[in-house]
Structure formats: structure tokens, C-alpha cells
Image (spheres, rainbow, N blue to C red):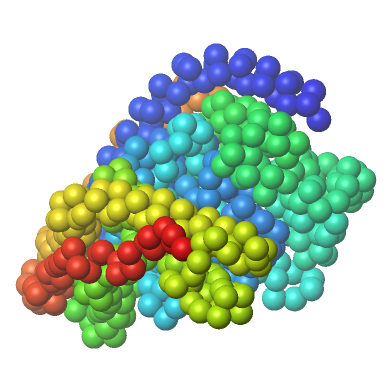
Amino acid sequence: MRKGVDCMIGHTKEVEAESITSSIPLQQLIERFKSLHGLISQNTYIKDTSHRLKRILDDATSPTTILVIGKERVGKSTVINGLLGREVLTVHNELSTSANTFIRYGEEECIRAVFLDGMVATFDIDKIELLTTSDVEVAQIIREYIDYVEVFINHDFLKNVTFVDSMALQMPTEQSAYFSELLVERADEIFWVIRNGEEATYAELSLLEKYNQRDIKPHFIINGIDTGDAADFAVSEKIRYGDQVGYMYPVSAKMALLAGLTQDSQMLEESGYLELMELIAALSENKGKKIEHIIDRLIDWLNYFHKEIEYIKTREPYQSAMESLKQYAGEEEFEYTRQQRDIALLSAYKQECQQVCNVFKSVETLYQLLQTLTSELYLRDEKIEEFEYYALHYQQSVREYRKLHVEYMQAYGVLDTQHRKAFGKGIEKGNPAQYNENISVMREKRNLDQLQTKCEALYNTIKRHETLVLENLYSTQNHLVELAQKRLSGIIRQVEDLNGQRKREKKEVRSSVEKILEFSCLEDAQRFIEEAVKPYLLNGLFELSGKQQVMIEHTIDKILSVDLSHEEVSIAPGQAEDLKLQEEFDAGFTVCPLRLTEADVVSDIPEPPVPLHV
């Protein structure tokens, strides 16, 4: 298996030398298609066609995209976490990933939720569970309108590769399996995850055969080698698949993740991830394969574009385009669904704002403050953690002292009882000369002295910790309020971004109305394809097969043959609905102050007992 990886790396070095020159023509071709996208995106009626091209262009300038697929509970998310060495994706025993998630490189870590209508919402990185796995009602409403999720992580590995954590394979029957064709189309490579010891089902094998008919050969990852010997299982599965699969790697995603968290290189090697990571590196360097993939997708898109514009006139362009615009900007049912999504988003943001505003509302003691610091990560920095360290030691010492003091008082009672039995009177009236004559009394007296010494020492420790806590109490409280206010401002900015986006959407919709009615942008697109795209594709810069050249010429000729001329239309569009979020979100949100006094912090403890002299 290792030899195969080495061969592939060697091959990709040769390919890379060729791709250095071929990537320049591809870049120029992509720039031409970007201009074409700018033309057709003015027509919102063919928005899906525009989105298809935009995805191809985005993918062409993105690192190698690796799609991770498989059934439920095979560990797809954990496999990716293992590659990153940290728990980026949320993993549940009972809840599966319910939104296709792209994990990309980003210096600033955040999440972008791309919705079906093109709107984009940005979230903090800790909201990944809300968008991908959570089963709470707000999360389910939001995900209903999500197209896909992008997670940006500051990790060097992601500079050369993008991972896609996909929803589980759909298997409506034992004989058939379904997976998103769009994701397969966008992927440069496919990693198919199966569980060690669990043979692929007939439905999976059937889907694999369909992929092979399209010259798609996934690489297989056998996850869970820590649960049993995977060597024999890998051999048997390889025999079952034959040449339908690429490489096959037995790994332990859990071990790899733990190795990343603990920086344990030995465990990483035992997890089987080193060879898997070498394969990924080799795949990411194979620029020639990616270029070929992008060219094929662009050819497919041209054919799709032809089918789209071929029926525009028969669909009554004026009526259809106007109806589509009304649905987008003003039709009640469509606007209602968008409002439901926005209400869900606002509800999530508002709930978080209220939580931040009231985070100190019930904090009346030092113990409650420490509990709050434990549960709210945004209230932590070096200064707060230093204060927390002394406060925790202070409270721990107080608890130990109270327990010790009770033990002392119990011992005192025992000594007093022994003294009365021995001498007929309490210890305060005892006769020291008589102690040596009573072993029981002397034993209890020594025990009491030891407890008194411990009490006194622990009491002094408490006072030292108490002084440190009180010295920093008020400055720490002010700083905590500042951190909470910073968090609140961040949430409000996210809502303002949504409002700004809706305003821009409104402007774009209104400016698109005239162009949709005229359809001149599609006529411009036809001319651009004829003058700028076709000659460049066929000028010999790309190593096209004879079949590809014939397909390009035939498809573009069909696009140019479509007559998009039309009579002038001059109907003023109706007023688009206001797309701004209706609620003034930032009104009335203030952080509840934190006002602990020294009396709230200082614990009431008894003075240490004085040495007993009898």
C-alpha cells in the first residue's frame, strides 16, 4: 500500500511540472467564465444555472476537494476530526450530521451558512452543533432552509485541501442507495468510510457500481481498527470491490483525534493516519486531474445552459420572469418561508443576547460567579483565569477548614468526656499532674493538639487567599462586564450583517427587474460565448480529446442557434417588499452589572481554636 502512495507522489511531481504551465490557460479560461457568469447572473430566472456555474468557478480556484461519504454511524465526522487533530465537527452517538459541511482554511475561524435562496449568515465557530447536528426546534427550522455549511478553520492542512462532511447515504430500500449528485460533481476525490467488521451492503455496492460506470473510483477508509483486527477484513473487502475502488486504508479515527489532542506521535502512527495523510497530500498535488475535472464540468454546464435557454421563449419569458421575480421579492407564500427562517435566526440570536445580558443576574456569591465562569467560555482570558485560580483555592481551603473545625470540636467533646470519667470534672478544671496517670485522656489530648495546629495553619492559608481575591475583586468584575458587553456587541453585529444583506438583496432584485424583462443579458451571454469562450477552449492550449472537442463545438453551436430576440417590454415592476429584518434588534439589550461586595465573597468561618493548656 505504501509503495502505491510513493508511486503516486512520484507521478504527481511529473504532473505538477506540466500543470504549472497548463494552470495559466485554465486561470484565463476561468476569468472568461467569470465574465460570462456576471452576464447571466443578471437574469434571476435562470438563477440555478448561474449558481451551478458559480460553484464550478469557486471550486476551480479552491484547493482539492475531498468528499467524505458513508452510512450513518461509520465515523465520517470523526475521520475528519482525526485529520485535523481537534474536535471541529460535532459528533453524537444518536444524532447524525444533517447539513453538508465544507471544512475550509481560514485565518479567522467562523461558520457560514449558505441558504437555498442564496442568503449567507455568519456564526461563531461554537455554533457548529446548532447548524449541523442539534435536534432543538430552532436548529431544525434553520437547517430546513440551509443549502450547505462552510466551516473555516486555521489549520495548515486545509491550505491544500477542503473536506466535505456529508449527510449519510440515503437507502430507501435494501437494493438501492442515494447520494447528492451535486456533491459528487463538486468533489475532486471521494473517500468512502465503512466500519471495521461491517461489510458494505448490497445498496452500497450498487451505488459504487454506478460511480464506476462514470469513471469515479472512491478511496475506502475502514474506520475502527482499535475495535479489532482490520487486516483480514480489508483484504476480504478489497476482493469484494475488485478494481472498483482506489486505495483502501484501515484507520482508527478516535486514536488519530486523541493523538492530535495529546501530541502523541506514536499513537498517530498506530492509528494508520500517516499513510492516509500522505495520500491526501499526493492527491492535492495532482493539479492535472483537477484541471481535467474542471474542464469536464464546464462542458457539462454549457450543455445545461443550452437546455435552459432553449425553452425560455416557450415559457413566455415575460410572464415567467415576472412571476419568478414576484415570488422572489413579494409573493406571499415564498416571503412567508423566508420570514420563518429569519424569525428562527433572530430567535437564536435574541436568545443568546438575553443569555449574555443576564449572565450575572443571579450571581450573588463567589461560588455562583465561579460556576458562571466555568459554563461561559466568552468570559475567560488570562486575567480572569488568574483570579479564578485564587478564588477556587480560597473556597477549597474554606471547605477543608470547616470540616477540620467540626472534627476539632468533636475531639474536644471526646476529651472532655474522658476527663470527667477520669477526674470527675471538666477539662477546664483539670489537674495537669494527673494526666500522666490516665492513658485515654493523654491520647485524646494529643489528638486535639494536632487538630488545633492544622486548624491554625489552614486558617492562615485562607486569609492569604482571601486577601488576593479581595485585592482583585472589583477590577475583575469590571473586566467581566466588559467581556460580556463585547460578546453582546458581536452578536448585534451579526444581526446587522443580516440586515445589511437583506438591504443589498432588495437593491439587486429591483435592478434585475428591467434586465429580466428585456433578457438582453442572455443575448450578451450568447455573443460572449461565441467570441471569447469557444475560441479559447479550442485554441489547443488544453489537451482535449477528440470527443471533448466535438462536444464543445456541437454544444456551443446549439447555444448560438437559440433565438432570444423579443419585443420591447416596458412594464414598470411592482414595488418589492421591504427585505429588512423587521425588528430593531439592538434595542433594550444591556448587560446586567456584576456587583459583588467583599461581604458576598468573604466566607464566614470561626476563629481557629487556641491551644488547650490543662
In the rendered image, residue 562, in percent from the top left (x then y), is placed at 36, 55
Q: Horizontal placement of 486 versus 195: left or right? A: left
Q: Residue at x 59, y 34 (%)?
A: 263
Q: Taking the image as drawn, is residue 549 in sight?
A: no
Q: Horizontal placement of 228 versus 45: left or right? A: right
> Up-down: is 476 above or below 331?
above
In the rendered image, residue 587, in percent from the top left (x then y), is placed at 8, 73
Q: Residue at x 92, y 45 (%)?
A: 232
In the rendered image, residue 396, in percent from the top left (x then y), is placed at 43, 59
Q: Residue at x 58, y 63 (%)?
A: 435
Q: Horizontal placement of 125 versus 509: left or right? A: right
Q: Horizontal placement of 149 versus 509: left or right? A: right
Q: Residue furthest bottom?
A: 332
Q: Taking the image as drawn, is residue 162 in sight?
A: yes
User: 487 or 7, which is in the foreground?
Assistant: 487
On-image quarter of the N terminus:
top right
**Image-quadrant location for residue 189:** top right
In the rendered image, residue 504, in percent from the top left (x then y), is placed at 15, 59
